[in-house]
Image: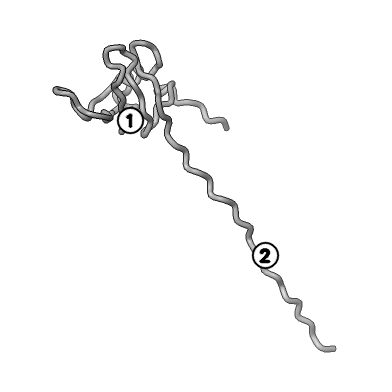
Amino acid sequence: MTDLPDPRNPNDVKVGQVWKDNDARLAEREFEVVLLDLDYYPKGRVRCKLLGELKKGQRALFYVRLDRFNGTKRGYSMTKDVEKPKPKPKTKKKKAKKKAKRGKS
């Protein structure tokens, strides 16, 4: 079976990704996805943590509607994806040698 994207999360937003605001007034604003709430009515929401220095009046944690993660000028663009864990190297298993028992004749 193929892994189809969740229809509630078409842009495949994941915890740990870093996104930036596409609004020219807030171009330096980057944040990390901390929590993904797909069941939040009607479109889902994402809990984000602001990266960098906080300016007066800014909050470190905030919510964003899930449909804003779309790459358009009114949305957000991904700058860093989640690092996938490296696969463990395969080790060869040693086969146990069977000793043949020979009876005396």
Please state if 82 lies on the left or on the right of 95 as rendered.
left
| Residue at the spot of label 1 | 33
Q: Position of residue 25 (x, y in %)?
A: 27, 12
Give above or below for 88 relative to 72. Answer: below
The C terminus sits in image quarter: bottom right
Q: Position of residue 68 (x, y in %)?
A: 34, 17
Q: Position of residue 76 (x, y in %)?
A: 35, 18
Q: Which structural element holds mark 1?
A: strand
- The residue sitting at 14% across, 23% down in the picture is 56
Q: Position of residue 99 (x, y in %)?
A: 73, 76
Residue in the foreground of this view, choosing between 75 and 96: 75
Q: Which structural element holds mark 2?
A: loop
| Residue at the spot of label 2 | 95
Give above or below for 97 relative to 82. Answer: below
Furthest toward the bottom, the residue is 105
Badge 2: few (under 14), some or many (20 or more) residues near its Cα, within 10 Å?
few
For marks 1 and 2, give the one nearer the viewer: 1
Badge 1: few (under 14), some or many (20 or more) residues near its Cα, within 10 Å?
many
- The residue sitting at 31% across, 25% down in the picture is 30
Please state if 10 lies on the left or on the right of 62 as rendered.
right
- The residue sitting at 31% across, 12% down in the picture is 24
Q: Quadrant of residue 42?
A: top left
Residue in the foreground of this view, choosing between 104 and 51: 51
Furthest toward the right, the residue is 105
